[in-house]
Amino acid sequence: MSSTANKTYMKRAIELAERGCGHVSPNPMVGAVIVKDGRIISEGYHARYGDLHAERAALAACRENPAGADLYVTLEPCCHHGKQPPCTDAIIESGIRRVFVGSADPNPLVAGKGVQILRDHGVEVIEDLLRAECDAINYVFFHYIKTGLPYVVMKYAMTMDGKIATRTGASKWITGEAARNQVQQDRSRYTGIMAGIGTVLKDNPLLTCRIDGGKNPVRIICDTSLRIPMDCQIVNTAAEIKTLIATCSQDEVKRKALQEAGCKLLTLPKQNGHVDLNALMQQLGKEKIDSILLEGGGQLNWSALNAGIVKRVQTYIAPKLFGGKEAPSPIRGLGIAEPSQAIRLTKPVIKTFGTDILLESEVILCSQE
């Protein structure tokens, strides 16, 4: 089979994998295509956490005997028992003769073992087909499985002169409908959404996903002193939408009231007078929150960057100017003293949504320099 055909089938597997976006965490997105005699005879993907893995889903949907067929799968097949049995067993039993793999699985329970088991049973395995493209869809999973910590994406919208609100604090709306819809897509994509108490007090947000078929993220509120109002929208809906409040407060009366309303409290140490964000990430990782969309104000954004927890920055830029020395900017706090100390970004990607621009970059960590 030609190299072009192989890539075409793997691209189809990638398209299938992305259908699981927002529904499979903390598992990876995986797609699979079965090809026999130059024809696709079945397809599958991991649709939801706990459901069939992509390989087993494709085999279950197979329209004819897969013996002697080729399997294209975006991630190395698993070889351990979890919520589902090993995919390597199903592949071997099916009689598939050749497997094309996109990404290697960094999970220590797999990590090359899946490929080796297939080879030990006479299945030919070709690795790294469109690996970069396959890796790109699972950056959250790779980070989480290696570190046990959430992948944090800091998002904000600003004008071309760098303002996130006017001098009066008004901020609705900076960007247009198309850009705001993309944000809703990301709220569905990432497991958690995090904001500070300042945002709650100022805007009284819901922090939900407002698109058909979308998934509400777990709401995480950083509230050092438990100032969150009992009548705010977040507390009022905590019984229906998972809500975590990270705090240092020992106010038992307020804590009990919030818990009775449906909130879960995470008690954490202080760092520079606020919730220790690194300790919070450790706790959220244990809660199986693999990714967070940070929609904080300028102070929380600075604290998150300063703590080193931000991995990616999304900057929506609207073709508007607000002006005003009192108008807030997206990152406040103390800031850095010298240009050489700047938090550096890399791999910029530019997208447009109507007249608005999204500039997305990864944060360069000190250990990467």
Image (cartoon, helix red, strand yellow):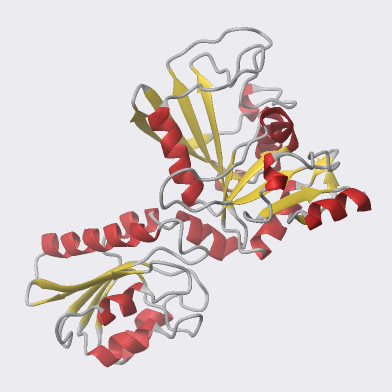
Q: Quadrant of the C terminus?
A: top right
| Image x and y of residue 27, in percent | 48, 67
Q: In this view, which residue lies farthest toward the top?
A: 324
Residue drawn at (28%, 81%) of the image: 60
In the image shown, does 187 or 125 lie closer to the viewer?
187
The answer to whether residue 67 is seen in the rendering is: yes
The answer to whether residue 266 is seen in the rendering is: no
In the image shown, does 364 or 300 lie closer to the viewer?
300
Give residue 273's quadrant in the image. Answer: top right
In the image shown, does 361 or 357 lie closer to the viewer?
357
| Image x and y of residue 137, in percent | 38, 55
Q: How many marks?
A: 0
| Image x and y of residue 328, in percent | 65, 18
| Image x and y of residue 13, in percent | 26, 63
Q: Quadrant of the N terminus?
A: bottom left
Q: On the picture, is 179 further left or further right than 163?
A: left
In the image shown, does 161 or 198 lie closer to the viewer?
198
Q: In this view, which residue lies farthest toward the left?
A: 37
Looking at the image, residue 19 lies above or below residue 83: above
Residue drawn at (38%, 58%) of the image: 135
Residue drawn at (45%, 51%) of the image: 214
Residue drawn at (31%, 76%) of the image: 57
Looking at the image, residue 5 lies above or below residue 272: below
Q: On the picture, is 326 further left or further right than 3?
A: right
